[in-house]
Image (cartoon, grey):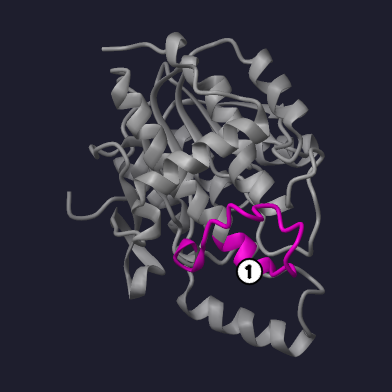
Amino acid sequence: MTTFSASDVPSMAGRTVVVTGANSGIGRAAAGALAARDARVVLAVRNLDKGRAAAAEMTGQVEVRQLDLADLASVRAFAADFTEPIAVLINNAGIMIPPLTRTADGFESQFGTNHLGHFALTNLLLPQVTERVVTVSSLAHRQGKIDFDDLNWEHKPYRAGAAYGQSKLANLLFTLELQRRLAEVGSPVLATAAHPGLSNTNLLRPGDRGALTQALMKAGISVIAQDDAGGALPTLYAAVADVPGNSYAGPRGLLGTRGAPKLVARSARARDADTARRLWDVSEQLTEVTFPRHALQTT
């Protein structure tokens, strides 16, 4: 397939897809595209009102359930209430470059939400997943570094951009190690990842910069960025295309910022199997959630 569009998503009839953070942005666009192809789509969202408003604009079978990835108690409750099979789990939700804040469990908010919340959710739901786990990363993973001495920014001066890069690198290392573990136990489930390129969604937070700077950045972004639908295509590609495990999908054009999706390269740090295993072990310790080896379906 030389190009891929939402019309290339096959019929998803009879299959359930869970999309985190699906009330806005590329998560909302991906969820809507899957619902339009007859999937039963569950919007896993922190704000139920926003989730219901998003669901109301989608066609097909769409449900809304509450999930706060910044609170492991909420993650556990969501997973405990979800007893049916899941064809595809899409770990889409994320926060980007906020001021230093901490999750309900005391983690730096970007690492806690973007990585640890999804790490716990995936492992808790994994026995019910039958096809794929898709995790949304970012071009910013290339600037990321896993600082095992201070993962939660408790000692060094906080740099929001560096913390974001660490969380997005963690997404790819998570995918790498998850696929290794799935293959090791003979599971047919694939772990894949995607990035949206530069998507003109919620990139700028009000008040983070001066009005003139924000206006100039928005003008520049509007020239090179994709809309939500375009930004969601790599996620859809990673979810349904014929790709191997540990695949990473992103836009094919303009330095990876926009265009139809294809399989793309990742940084050397994102390919480091030793770091991926170490991060997995630390993540299990921090979340107290482990890989459900004995509960998985095998081929």
Residue 57 drawn in magenta:
no
Above or below: residue 195 compared with residue 86: below
Q: Percent x, y for residue 175?
A: 42, 40
Predominant SS along the magenta part: loop
Question: Magenta part of the protein: which range?
Answer: 141-165
Q: Is residue 42 shown to the viewer in this render?
A: no
Categorize mark 1 by other alpha carbons within 10 Å: few (<14), some (14-19), many (20+).
some
Left or right relative to 291: residue 148? right
Front in this rendered view, residue 283 or 72: 283
Which residue appears at 40% of the width and 58% of the height?
A: 269
Camera sees residue 227: yes
Q: Residue at x 29, y 36 (%)?
A: 245
Quarter of the image for residue 213 reads bottom right
Viewer-nearest residue: 172 or 64: 172
Residue at the image position 44 percent from the left and 26 percent from the top = 38
Which residue is disc 1 drawn over?
161
